[in-house]
Image (cartoon, coloured by chain):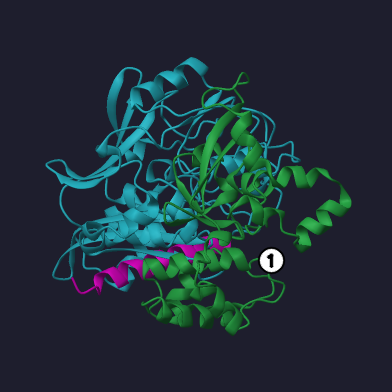
Amino acid sequence: MRPFEYVRPSEAAEAIRARGVAGADTAYLAGGTTLLDLMKLDVIHPAQLVDITRIQGKAYRKVERTDAGLRIGALVSMAELAANEILLKDYPVLSQSLWLAASAQLRNMARVGGNVLQRTRCSYFRDTSYTECNKRTPGSGCAALDGFHRGHAVLGTSDQCIAMYPGDWAQALIALDALVEVLGANGPRSLRFADLHRLPGNTPNIENNLKPGELITGFVIPGGAWRRSLYRKIRDRESYAFANASAAVALDLNGDVLRDVRIGLGGVATIPWRARKAEEMLRGKPLTEANATAAADAEFADARPRQHNRFKVALGKATLVRALLEARDMKV
Amino acid sequence: MDDERILDVSRRSFLSAGATALPVVAAIAPATAKTATTVGKHMDPRISNITLEINGRQHRLAVDTRMTLLDALREKLGLTGSKKGCDHGQCGACTVHVDGERHLSCLTLAVAAEGTKVVTIEGLEDSSGLHPMQQAFIDHDAFQCGYCTPGQIMSAVACVHEGHVHDDAEIREYMSGNLCRCAAYPNIVAAIKQAAAKMGQG
């Protein structure tokens, strides 16, 4: 690991000032589970770390119902949030997508603010002995295109990058139209979770729409509860593995008919993937296996699989259909 | 642990002393560090003077900001029970308790652990002897090479405290962050069930 300075401010404003002074060559540290891993690999090498775990303020550490919806502080740990009573009862998809991720130790350490910015597991991004990686070194090429890409994305790819977004919770957030609260040098602002991540396009090195130094302070799930919701995650092993395909679904059923349906897909895309085509096809219709299958087909119609990840198209569709039908049959 | 105990002849200290005298100096670093450091900033911004609370005892030390909690435990404080397996948060061999939660010491900076209470495998035993989980691992032969065992035990104790020991499937799910290349998993599950009963849960 390369040398860096470490600062531990007690106020959020101080943290933002500290990052502003050091410029782009600096990073916020909370759980550190992605950051320190990538620093040891020399994939990233900030000159300064700003530890935000001691910044004062209950709002960063609590989960509460507000007039705007459910608000979740960014410094809540994945483990704490997964076990939160409100989530377990009213937002099962938010809880399940957390406890089905990582390991117990990692969930204790990782905070939900950093979780949504988890970096890809693409082995060519993580291994600096490969010179070609447009995400790590813009313009250098992409070793994954003709390399081993079984775990890579089939949706939202570009000819510059096919790295998969590896997280789980983000799929639930995007499905529920979450908002992200951020704090920057010019004060607080809020953006739609769907606007947080950027498709790789020609700039896979730019992964999100946060401005330099902006700090995620919380998330808001607008509206009321989504009790008929769940997260299905299909992996090579049953626990402690990244998704080959996953689906976060939330349904509002009127009898058999879908008044509303929300779908986030994981394991198959370059960013947390909102399945708007599938949603559009299902809204107002009875939730049958035939309708669910047609919707899944539509969502994956634009999929661009390569040699080793063709299975993700069929698996992604099957995962979505299964999640929809299981949510339909939930007793709520 | 007190300073005298560090000076007891153990297999590790005997082997270390045989190789060079330096490791003996390193082993008593906690005592010397008290006089060598003052609280506050170091001249080099990449070195920090910190106080760590490990197993109920305060340790003052100067660390490179890059040093992980795991390396501080092993290399600075002579607490070699916590093991370095992958050093990337994937294997669980470095698991310790931080403020009562199981954390990976290889992905924790020593500087960031300041102000927390850390418990390692060396701090599990009390005056009455081995912790019920340690005894259960012996009773059930829950290891072969033993390298992952300290991490398994620290994780298992937390797993019981969390209440994730209702059945074998739940234990396996909540212990999945601790890999055992010898695959002693069935024995580990059996040990955790025995210890959970002794610890008043499960």
Query: On the rendered structure, is B52 left or right of A44?
Result: left
**Residue at horizontal 83%, vertical 52%?**
B17
Query: On the rendered structure, is B40 left or right of A68?
Result: right
Q: Main secondary structure of the magenta part?
A: helix
**Residue at horizontal 28%, vertical 27%?**
A189
- In the picture shown, does residue B146 fall above or below B55? below
Q: Is residue B67 magenta?
A: no
- Foreground of the two, B34 or A291: B34
- Foreground of the two, B138 or A239: B138
- Foreground of the two, A148 or A69: A69
**Kind of residue indicated by mark 1:** Tyr
Q: Which picture quadrant has residue B188? A: bottom right
Q: Residues within 10 Å of mark 1 (few under 14, many from 20)?
A: some
Give the colour in which the image draws chain B.
Answer: green
- In the picture shown, does residue B144 fall above or below A321? below
Magenta residue span: A310-332
Q: Is residue A325 magenta?
A: yes
Give the colour in which the image draws chain A.
Answer: cyan
**Residue at horizontal 39%, vertical 71%?**
B164
Using the rendered image of the protein, determine whether residue A44 is visible from the camera's viewpoint. Answer: no
- Foreground of the two, A176 or A51: A51
Q: Which picture quadrant has residue B200? A: bottom left
Residue position marked by numbered label 1 in the rendering: B147
Q: x and y percent of residue A32 in the render?
A: 51, 42
Q: x and y percent of residue A71 in the render?
A: 23, 44
**Helix, strand or loop under label 1:** loop
Point out the image quarter for the N terminus of chain A.
top right
Query: What is the chain letter for disc 1?
Result: B
Q: x and y percent of residue B106 in the render?
A: 60, 49
- In the picture shown, does residue A176 fall above or below B198? above
